[in-house]
Amino acid sequence: MEKILVSGNGPLRGETAIAGAKNAALPAIAATLLSAEPVTISNVPQVRDISTALELLVLLGCSMERDGSELTLTGAGVHSVRAPYELVRTMRGSILLLGPLLARFGVADVSLPGGCAIGSRPVNEHIAGLERMGAEITIDAGYIKAKCRRLRGANISFDTPSVTATENLMMAASLADGVTTIENAALEPEVSDLALLLSSMGAKVTGAGTSTIRISGCRQLHGARHRMPPDRIESGTFLTAAAATRGDVTIRETQPAHLGLVLSKLKSCGAELTVGEDWIRLQSHGRRPRAVSISTAPYPAFPTDMQAQFVALNAVAEGTATAVENIFENRFMHVAELQRMGADIELQGHTAVINGRERLQGAPVMATDLRASASLIIAALVADGQSSIDRVYHLDRGYANIVEKLASLGANIQRMQSE
């Protein structure tokens, strides 16, 4: 098992490029199951969740060719519709196989998903939507077992917007008979990106990016080429690290339009931002950040995937701030680890009250989930002395080469084997 060692050593400075979006690549990989023809996806991040998803598709019978960040998947040879627990348990995005398998083959057998332990992620919206489209679904021994003759279009309305449920039903509806309407759909950029891929494969999708999406089903979809958008959470993470360390960092190959409220909050903490078409520069001018309160909610509000990083930023900011978590009930597990480093944080239900301190203290800490890992690295960058971060496999699920990228910005950081 590996750990990361970080010694706080001053501001981050320089430039780094942002990888493709993991949360866009996972549904795109699942969507390749909708066609027997080759689908080529470029700018795919080399992270563990993607490797797991690809291993799963190959197990089902897809053929794969990979050249760096570009991969081609061909679903002509799919011979299995069973996504086993042994792979699914490490990645919640595996639920995205349910819709494509059912739509194309009329049957799917997908293990209930796993992933980070940050709270429940119910699959009821996925199941209810597919049942409205004519599927028969049971849950047996931890597996979702679904079958149908052919899915048919339906009107579906979510009680709460769900990104993965929206994506799953969009893919299923692409091969259904008739028109499917999804009301209260998720607005995230990853949903819009999936719509672009499906459209390039021959699907008829309108309204992605709004609360109402309509999909006119086709008899079959064909191959396509598609490029993944930049990862907005990786972008936000590097900018937050720059602000926390009082640095001067430019991120390239990003998409500023997807970072609206994150950029607004960084400005509120005192950072100067310069924004181009595909780049952002954050300058702190050596100033300590000001405390800034956040409250998570579905896009375009403040993302839950940036909450932990901003808690770390506020831990060394001037003043007091609150972080309200409205998405996941267990997403404050990083707080106890930050407290080990001297952070002054009090939990009050689903709210964290953070009193900023000038410096933190290096300490051995343990990552509890993907974004918590990033928050601990940010805290370690602004701490006196050395910190060791264990369980970095969480970090590897969603950040490509983050240690190398931070080192290129001047961070004193290295990965090594745990004793």
Image: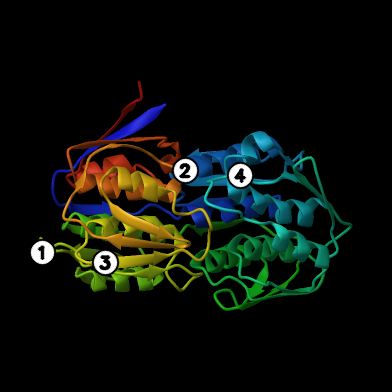
Q: Nearer the viewer, residue 404 or 116?
A: 116
**Residue at 66% over, 65% down:** 202
Mark 2 and mark 1: span between their CA atoms?
Answer: 33 Å
Q: Would residue 28 appear left or right of 390 to someone viewing this image?
A: right
**Which corner quadrant holds the N terminus?**
top left
Depth check: give the residue in front, 86 or 24. Answer: 86
Q: Residue 240: which quarter of the image? A: bottom left
Q: Which residue is mark 4?
A: 114
- Judge whether residue 35 can be spotted in this image: no
Q: Secondary structure under badge 1? A: loop
Residue 308: % across, % down: 38, 55
Q: Which element carries disc 2, helix, strand or loop?
A: loop
Q: Could you tell me which residue is drawn at 83 percent across and 53 percent down?
A: 106
Q: Nearer the viewer, mark 2 or mark 4?
A: 4
Q: Which residue is mark 1?
A: 285
Q: Amino acid at mark 1?
A: His
- Whole-percent x, y for residue 310 in the image: 33, 60
Other-residue count near label 3 (Cα within 10 Å), few / some / many at <14 / 14–19 / ≥20: some
Q: Nearer the viewer, mark 3 or mark 4?
A: 3
At label 2, the amino acid type is: Arg
Report the residue marked by disc 3. Answer: 320
Residue located at (22% from left, 56% from top): 316
Figure quadrant of residue 271: bottom left
The span from disc 2 to disc 4 (Cα, nearest Å) is 13 Å
Residues at marks 3 and 4, CA–CA distance in whole angstroms: 35 Å
